[in-house]
């Protein structure tokens, strides 16, 4: 269907989209029709414009045509008088999608995840004259309110990492305004000068043609017949030497000079801007996707600036030494005021708020991912309490020409400590491989197949069960919403949920001193820009799955405090719950559940039985027990409970009579204020030693002494009675 039709005196432009009705319906459900209006603008030459059957006015507002991740075929029918035409994007890949055949330029546009203001540009030739046309509009999101949510995302990112939101070579741009504080990155310099360069060059030419002068006095020696006027100071001298025609008189003359403070500033500003433009132009040309149209424009500007700074006008202009006082010429005079204004703009910092200056930002999917990381860090900080110290090791890193990215892995780590004890760490985009490189991932975590790259990793440190035990949770930010709805609730895409299952299966834990792999990830959760009533979300399948299998999703979007509480309460529960409760409720991971295979380094534990927490003491020492609960000292001294596969209880008098085989280990709460969490061993297969072996007296300590198989049987043989 034809969505947009522009009749120009040189051509007719058509924009189509076969799936527009479905896209519009999805956007209305997620954002609301009142937030899907945009302003259309165009350059001269348009005779009429229509949006469907409705007439459009230049600068008028109407419903949006262009949305993210949609394909729009574009047809431009030129008359026979047009010999050449092309799409005028700065991105060569966009221009390659268009071809000009038989007076028709045809192609398609897809903005991907880039939203904001954009321009459809055409470059065409009529005879030897090259003409340009621009159609301006906004590309909106079908998932978030661009006018409200996008601003909030950018503001939150800028509050944490200034200028991280900016990018280059994008299809859309946004309005920005000056800021009194901050720096001016090269990207902003280039973007601002792009809008000022025509006015700057025109002002330079105007000054060179009609410069401001000043009278400069200097002394000369002239004969009487060469004097244009007779100063009072030499009247007597002239009368005295009136008969001497060759006598020279010293007089002062005034000439107009270009060597003024304002012209020195012009020379300085022109040289500085020209040099920086040349340097950045070389860097931009190195980008593979830079279009030939843009390269031609940059070449033209560079040649013009070079020609201006080499103009003979500047030969008599001296070196700029600064402005000693305010200059009314620079502030008000024609040409000079424009030079001074451009210079001031290029030196100022800019904020990501509505303004007249055009800057480009990262695509919305990347911005949403960074924003989710910031939101999770804020929630962890809030739930930890005000007395927790936060150590930011994260930093921005240069990427490409002059844009910045948030550091990944070790370079993005945020540590949460209290009284010097580590409580949690948050990492952005770690990469888990089997390389053992901790700079890109987390210590002791790896993948033996393909690299795993979750967006956000939260590791909580628990000391109640085992000192320094870490609980790992993954969060993946997805700027997508499934087309299906469940009773008015947006749902995450199925493949995103499946990805969390793959993460949990593929990421393992391994001690440096051991070759044994153990499951690492307890849970994985999708963060997506969904909407819906909180009560409906709480009964949805993707949310209930969090409590059932520790895989699920949380809707998270800007300015949605009610649904944000779901994530807040979940993280609060992770921080506040005991390790035993977490492991009891989770699918077996790297906790204390055994596999059927016995490890090669299986341990025999000689254990003193704590009678206060073990019922049926006589049954235990006589080989009739089905379970044994470890004593409190055993909890402190046990190195790796998973390797304990045999338990030999110490009987009264300090003897070992036999040993059990451990079937399984689990956690159990007991009535003990100091050691409320114990390890419970399910045991079977009692084996009686040929002769009891002596093992000292350790009843009061309730210790567990771990020995290898060889050590255990050697002891039993040496201490047999």
Image (spheres, grey):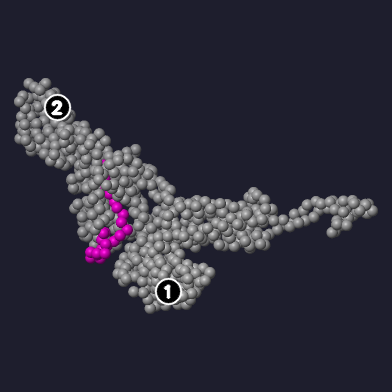
Give the image quarter of residue 148: bottom left
| Residue sitting nearer the eye, 176 or 682 | 176
According to the picture, the residue beneath numbered tag 1 turns out to be 77
Q: Secondary structure at mark 1?
A: strand
Crowd class of label 2 (few under 14; some 14 to 19; many from 20; radius 10 Å): few
For residue 610: magenta? no
Q: Is residue 482 left or right of residue 93?
A: left
Of the image marks 2 and 1, the number of the one nearer the N terminus? 1
Percent position of residue 500, x then y: 25, 52
The magenta region covers: 470-493
The residue located at (32%, 40%) in the rendering is 437
- Above or below, 468 relative to 255: above
Can residue 337 be seen in this snapshot?
Answer: no
The residue located at (10%, 22%) in the rendering is 717
Can residue 127 be seen in this snapshot?
Answer: yes
According to the picture, the residue beneath numbered tag 2 turns out to be 710
- Above or below, 703 relative to 37: above
| Residue sitting nearer the eye, 538 or 87 | 87
Q: Secondary structure at mark 2?
A: helix
The residue located at (77%, 56%) in the rendering is 254
Pointer 2 with pointer 1, Cβ within 8 A: no
- Above or below, 301 relative to 641: below
């Amino acid at each position: 269907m034809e969505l947009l039709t522009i009749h120009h005196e040189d051509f007719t432009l058509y924009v189509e989209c076969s799936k527009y009705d479905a896209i519009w319906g999805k956007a209305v459900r997620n954002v609301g029709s009142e937030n899907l209006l945009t302003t259309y603008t165009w350059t001269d030459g348009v005779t009429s414009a229509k949006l469907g059957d409705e007439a459009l006015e230049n600068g008028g507002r109407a419903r949006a045509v262009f949305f993210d991740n949609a394909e729009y075929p574009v047809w431009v029918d030129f008359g026979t008088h047009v010999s050449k035409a092309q799409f005028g994007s700065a991105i060569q890949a966009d221009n390659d999608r268009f071809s000009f055949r038989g007076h028709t330029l045809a192609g398609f546009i897809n903005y991907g995840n880039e939203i904001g203001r954009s321009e459809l540009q055409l470059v065409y030739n009529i005879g030897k004259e090259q003409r340009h046309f621009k159609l301006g509009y906004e590309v909106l999101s079908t998932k978030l309110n661009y006018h409200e949510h996008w601003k909030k995302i950018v503001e939150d990112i800028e509050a944490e990492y200034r200028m991280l939101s900016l990018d280059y070579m994008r299809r859309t741009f946004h309005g920005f305004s000056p800021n009194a504080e901050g720096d001016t990155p090269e990207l902003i310099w280039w973007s601002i000068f792009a809008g000022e360069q025509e006015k700057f060059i025109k002002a330079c030419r105007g000054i060179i043609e009609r410069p401001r002068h000043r009278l400069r006095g200097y002394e000369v020696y002239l004969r009487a017949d060469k004097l244009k006027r007779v100063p009072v100071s030499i009247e007597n001298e002239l009368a005295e030497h009136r008969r001497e025609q060759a006598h020279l008189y010293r007089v002062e003359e005034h000439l107009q000079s270009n060597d003024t403070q304002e012209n020195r500033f012009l020379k300085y500003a022109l040289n500085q801007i020209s040099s920086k433009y040349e340097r950045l132009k070389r860097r931009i040309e190195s980008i593979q996707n830079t279009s030939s149209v843009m390269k031609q424009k940059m070449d033209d500007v560079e040649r013009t600036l070079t020609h201006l700074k080499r103009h003979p006008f500047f030969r008599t202009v001296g070196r700029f030494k600064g402005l000693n006082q305010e200059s009314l010429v620079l502030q008000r005079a024609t040409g000079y005021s424009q030079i001074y204004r451009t210079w001031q703009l290029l030196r100022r910092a800019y904020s990501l708020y509505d303004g007249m200056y055009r800057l480009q930002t990262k695509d919305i999917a990347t911005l949403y991912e960074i924003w989710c990381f910031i939101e999770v860090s804020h929630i962890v900080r809030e739930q930890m309490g005000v007395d927790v110290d936060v150590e930011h090791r994260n930093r921005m890193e240069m990427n490409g020409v002059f844009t910045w990215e948030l550091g990944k892995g070790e370079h993005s780590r945020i540590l949460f400590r209290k009284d010097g004890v580590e409580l949690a760490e948050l990492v952005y985009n770690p990469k888990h491989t089997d390389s053992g490189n901790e700079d890109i991932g987390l210590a002791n975590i790896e993948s033996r197949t393909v690299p795993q790259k979750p967006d956000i990793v939260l590791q909580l440190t628990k000391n109640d069960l085992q000192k320094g035990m870490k609980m790992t949770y993954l969060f993946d930010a997805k700027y997508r919403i499934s087309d299906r709805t469940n009773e008015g609730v947006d749902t995450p895409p199925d493949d995103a949920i499946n990805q969390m299952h793959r993460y949990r299966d593929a990421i393992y834990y391994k001690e440096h001193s051991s070759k044994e792999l153990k499951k690492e990830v307890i849970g994985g959760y999708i963060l997506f820009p969904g909407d819906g009533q909180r009560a409906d979300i709480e009964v949805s399948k993707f949310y209930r799955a969090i409590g059932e299998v520790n895989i699920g999703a949380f809707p998270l979007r800007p300015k949605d405090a009610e649904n944000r509480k779901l994530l807040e309460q979940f993280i609060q529960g992770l921080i506040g719950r005991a390790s035993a409760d977490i492991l009891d409720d989770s699918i077996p991971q790297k906790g204390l559940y055994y596999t059927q295979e016995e490890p090669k380094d299986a341990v025999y534990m000689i254990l003193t039985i704590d009678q206060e927490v073990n019922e049926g003491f006589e049954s235990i020492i006589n080989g009739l027990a089905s379970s044994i609960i470890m004593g409190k000292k055993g909890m402190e001294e046990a190195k790796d409970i998973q390797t304990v596969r045999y338990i030999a209880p110490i009987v009264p008098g300090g003897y070992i009579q036999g040993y059990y085989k451990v079937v399984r280990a689990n956690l159990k709460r007991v009535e003990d204020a100091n050691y409320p969490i114990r390890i419970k061993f399910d045991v079977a297969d009692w084996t009686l030693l040929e002769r009891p072996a002596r093992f000292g007296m350790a009843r009061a300590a309730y210790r567990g002494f771990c020995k290898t198989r060889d050590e255990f049987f050697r002891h039993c043989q040496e201490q047999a009675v």
